[in-house]
Amino acid sequence: ATLWLEGLVLANCQAEADGGAVRMDDSDVSLRDVRIQDCYAGNSGGAIYAARGSLRLESVKITRCSTETGIEGENAQGLGGAIRIVKVPEVELSEVNITGCSAVKGGALHIDGGTDSETTLNRVRLADSTATEEGGLVYISSG
């Protein structure tokens, strides 16, 4: 499946599990000139949860998004306050601004890349985000 979003505001979104605003699995997703704000996911990806496929963000602003922050340790939930990326082979973030997000691991970004993944960040600003456990801004593993 392919999804292209342009010139939108996604606000006050909530998901019990993954992807407060957008959840993709084995799809190709592109967002351009999109604002995502005040979104929440109970497990991971307060704004966006991406698994497999490809993810491209251009001129995207994500503010005040979060995940559950109460379950820590080996069985932690709350991964990626703004974005959680799981084994997506091709990720490109260009002119992306992420601020004021929170999670257990990866206050802004949580990337579980796998061994064949490539993530490119170009003119990306990450600020004022927190993690209760690890990776205040970014948490990366090759899982």
Image (spheres, grey):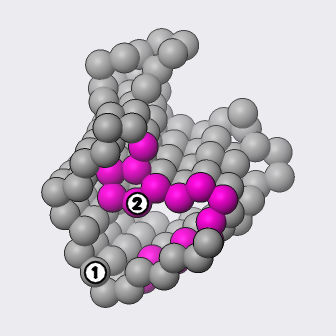
The residue closer to the viewer here, 125 or 108, is: 108
- 94 above or below 41? below
* Residue at left offset 46%, top offset 20%: 76
Quadrant containing the C terminus in the rendered view: top right
The residue closer to the viewer here, 109 or 52, is: 52
Q: Name the quadrant containing residue 31.
A: bottom left
Residue with the mark numbered 1: 8
Instruction: Measuring from the top left, give residue 97's x and y in whole percent.
Output: 35, 66
Badge 1 density bin: few <14, some 14–19, many ≥20, Cα 10 Å: few
Tell me the distance, in whole angstroms, between the alpha carbons under discs 2 and 1: 13 Å
Mark 2 or 1, nearer chain start: 1
**Residue 111 makes an appearance in the image:** yes
Residue 25 in the magenta stretch? The answer is: yes
In the picture, measured across the screen, residue 37 lies left or right of residue 110, that is left
Farthest residue, direction right: 116
Residue with the mark numbered 2: 22
The kind of residue tagged 1 is Leu
Instruction: Measuring from the top left, give residue 53's x and y in whole percent.
Output: 68, 63
The residue closer to the viewer here, 28 or 143, is: 28
Instruction: Measuring from the top left, give residue 24's x and y in whole percent.
Output: 53, 58
The kind of residue tagged 2 is Val
* Residue at left offset 66%, top offset 36%: 141
In the picture, measured across the screen, residue 23 lies left or right of residue 60, that is right
Badge 2 density bin: few <14, some 14–19, many ≥20, Cα 10 Å: many
Helix, strand or loop for disc 2:
strand
**Residue 108 makes an appearance in the image:** no
Quadrant containing the N terminus in the rendered view: bottom right
* Residue at left offset 69%, top offset 48%: 87
Helix, strand or loop for disc 1:
loop
